[in-house]
Amino acid sequence: MVSFMLIHMIKLISLKGEFYKIDCLLNDIL
């Protein structure tokens, strides 16, 4: 469970740029 969360966090960090762009798009839509 914990290791799964760590892997998920690593994926989020590695795709930080993509998530940031998606977050900006969502903010523009909302």
Image (cartoon, rainbow, N blue to C red):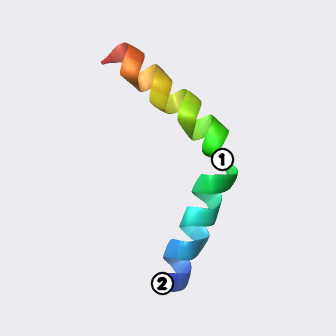
Real-space CA distance between mark 2 and mark 1, rounded to the nearest whole angstrom: 20 Å
Spot occupied by residue 6 in the image (x, y as percentages of width and height): 56, 74
- The amino acid on which the numbered mark 2 sits, given as a three-letter code, is Val
Q: Residue at x 52, y 30 (%)?
A: 22
Q: Secondary structure at mark 1?
A: loop
Sequence-wise first label, 2 or 1:
2
Seen in the picture, residue 30 relative to 3 is either above or below; the reply is above
Left or right of residue 21, residue 29 in this image: left
Which quadrant would the C terminus be assigned to in this image? top left
Left or right of residue 5, residue 26 in this image: left
Spot occupied by residue 7 in the image (x, y as percentages of width and height): 60, 71
Are there few (<14), some (14-19), or many (20+) residues within 10 Å of tag 2?
few
Spot occupied by residue 8 in the image (x, y as percentages of width and height): 55, 65
Residue carrying label 2: 2
Q: Residue at x 48, y 84 (%)?
A: 2
- The amino acid on which the numbered mark 1 sits, given as a three-letter code, is Leu
Seen in the picture, residue 13 relative to 25 is either above or below; the reply is below
Seen in the picture, residue 17 relative to 27 is either above or below; the reply is below
Q: Residue furthest top?
A: 28
- Count numbered badges in the picture: 2
Q: Residue at x 55, y 34 (%)?
A: 20
Are there few (<14), some (14-19), or many (20+) residues within 10 Å of tag 1?
few
Residue carrying label 1: 15
Q: Quadrant of residue 29?
A: top left
Which quadrant would the N terminus be assigned to in this image? bottom left
